Amino acid sequence: MRLFDTHVHLDFPQFHGDRQAILAELRAQRVAVINVGVDLGSSEASLALARDHPYVFAACGFHPHDANAFTPEAEAKLAELLRQGAVAVGECGLDFYRDRSPRDVQVAAFRAQLRLARRLDLPVILHQRAAWDAFREVLSEEGPVRGVVHAFSGDEAMAGQVVRLGLYIGIGGPLTYAKNEGLRRAMARVPLSRVLLETDAPYLPPEPLRGQRNDPLKVRLVAGRLAELHRQPLEAIAAATWANACDLFAVSPSLPPSRT
Ligand SMILES: [Zn+2]
């Protein structure tokens, strides 16, 4: 069985002590990952990780928290990085929950990255928190994009809107949280052809690991919960979401053959 964790931040300092051990374990346990940039430094680090590991791929972009730093010079540099083998633009989007950059600055950086993705014919990895209406408005104004709404935690109506926009739903640890009954109801009905698995490691650890650092091996717990919701074997969930990720990001990860 292979699993594809489509959203990790292995370059973050939380992994300074054991990054190589985790990368070796991912290979041994047949887990491919997309390492996602949030600014120029982490985008470069993502590309470096991808160069060294044939089951790691890089996304380069500016998180809405970092939209303040998205100057014209930064945009030019990002375009240069994206041409060095990135498989997606992101993460980009809107975060009106923390509001770490002013909202108009977030919207401008988001639009610019959607245009960059179109110009380079790349999919986008989208972050949205407490900004759904503005997020949808920007997406519809900028025209159709290929991509994934990462860390999805909405209800059935919102999941339906994501699917109608032609986007994938990125589902992670929150699927396992006790309070998220509405999310589970929504994910039980979403067609598997629109779902990607993710961890957002080091953040959002699934149950029963809340409070600990998350890592991409834990994507199995998310897959397990989705398998229960869809009443399907874990292997079927793994295979469907693996194929979705390979399609969207146009990749074919190299991992050792299964021992079974
Ligand atoms: Zn992230």
Image (cartoon, helix red, strand yellow):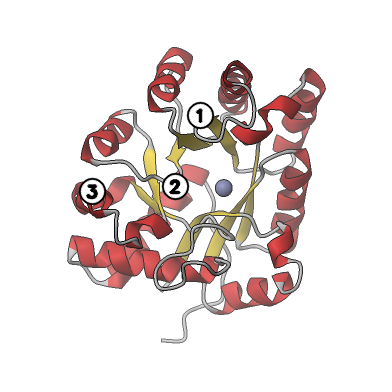
Q: Is ligand 1 within 8 Å of the beta carbon of the residue shown at mark 2?
A: yes
Q: Which residue is at the front of the view, 4 or 61? A: 61
Q: Which residue appears at 76% of the width and 38% of the height?
A: 40
Q: Is residue 135 left or right of residue 190?
A: right
Quadrant of the rendered image containing residue 145: top left
Quadrant of the rendering where the N terminus is positioned = bottom left
Q: Is residue 34 left or right of residue 171?
A: right
**Type of amino acid at the residue the image marks with label 3:** Gly
Residue 24 image position (x, y, % from top left): 65, 76
In this rendering, is residue 22 above or below 136?
A: below
**Type of amino acid at the residue the image marks with label 2:** Ala
Using the rendered image of the protein, determine whether residue 62 is visible from the camera's viewpoint. Answer: no
Separation (CA) of disc 3 from disc 1: 22 Å
Identify the residue position indicated by label 3 in the image: 182
Identify the residue position indicated by label 1 in the image: 96
**Type of amino acid at the residue the image marks with label 1:** Phe
In this rendering, is residue 166 above or below 180?
A: above
Quadrant of the rendered image containing residue 64: top right
